[in-house]
Amino acid sequence: MSQASAFPAPVVLWSHEEEERAGKPLLVLLHGYGSNEQDLFSLAGLLPQDFVVASLRAPIATGPGFTWFPLTASIDYSLDAVKDAAEYVFSWLDSFKSNHSSVTLLGFSMGMAMATSLLRQRPADFAAVVGLSGFAVDADADPAFRDAELDGSVPLFWGRDQQDPVITPDKIEYTMEWVRKHTDLTKVLYTGMWHGINQQEIGHVGEFLEHKVLS
């Protein structure tokens, strides 16, 4: 049974007032493990201003922040937990997405796992995905993950540092195989960034969004 109905009401930071959002492309920011909606929101001013940006807080409190689902290495992790988190995001997004010309997802670390999971469950719903220092979950042929419908046409930006100490090699290997098979991939490697985001990467993300979503 889904746990999504037990989650709290969504907490969101918006770049525009409600009356200024209609008809504009939407960019949804999905933060990493143990963080919150404020973490990525500073990116809103560094990315193309055509977008309305919404930064969503994950629904599960953990330590000083929040998480979308338990860490994949923990005993509490399950694919059902990932699907519950996706259901939570979809129920929020479905209430207003028709107001926007398109929806693009940007996720950092676990937020990339969320962004790719949302795309995989609704392959036709998103204009593009940006993944920063993150991964895609191993869905183990779960029918909710409709990978067969992803024909490589959805643009996906994946930026990472090969020295990232957080995302384990098995996750990188699975993600590499998945993105190459199912998305229109733009992959960029950075040095000295570790498990983070740098100015050069944000510049590349802005260019990606301009060319793949706005043009």
Image: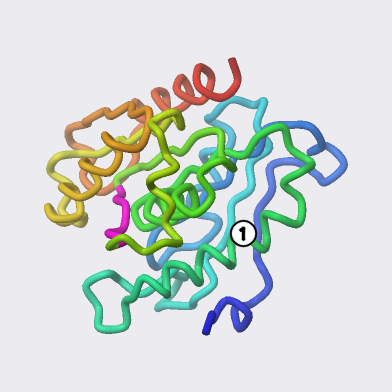
Instruction: Tell which of 126 and 134 is nearer to you.
Output: 126
Horizontal arrangement in the rendering, residue 206 relative to residue 132 (left or right): right
Residue ID at (32%, 83%): 76
| Secondary structure, magenta segment, majority class | loop
Is residue 168 shown above or below 3?
above
In the rendered view of the protein, which quadrant contains the C terminus? top right
Spot occupied by residue 32 in the image (x, y as percentages of width and height): 40, 58
- The disc labelled 1 sits on which kind of residue? Phe
Q: Residues within 10 Å of mark 1 (few under 14, many from 20)?
A: some
Residue ID at (36%, 70%): 79
Magenta-drawn segment: 134-139
- From the image, tell me which residue sits under label 1: 90
Residue ID at (51%, 39%): 43
Horizontal arrangement in the rendering, residue 19 relative to residue 200 (left or right): right
Q: How is the image coloured?
A: rainbow
Is residue 136 shown above or below 143?
above
Circle 1 SS class: helix
Horizontal arrangement in the rendering, residue 174 relative to residue 121 (left or right): left
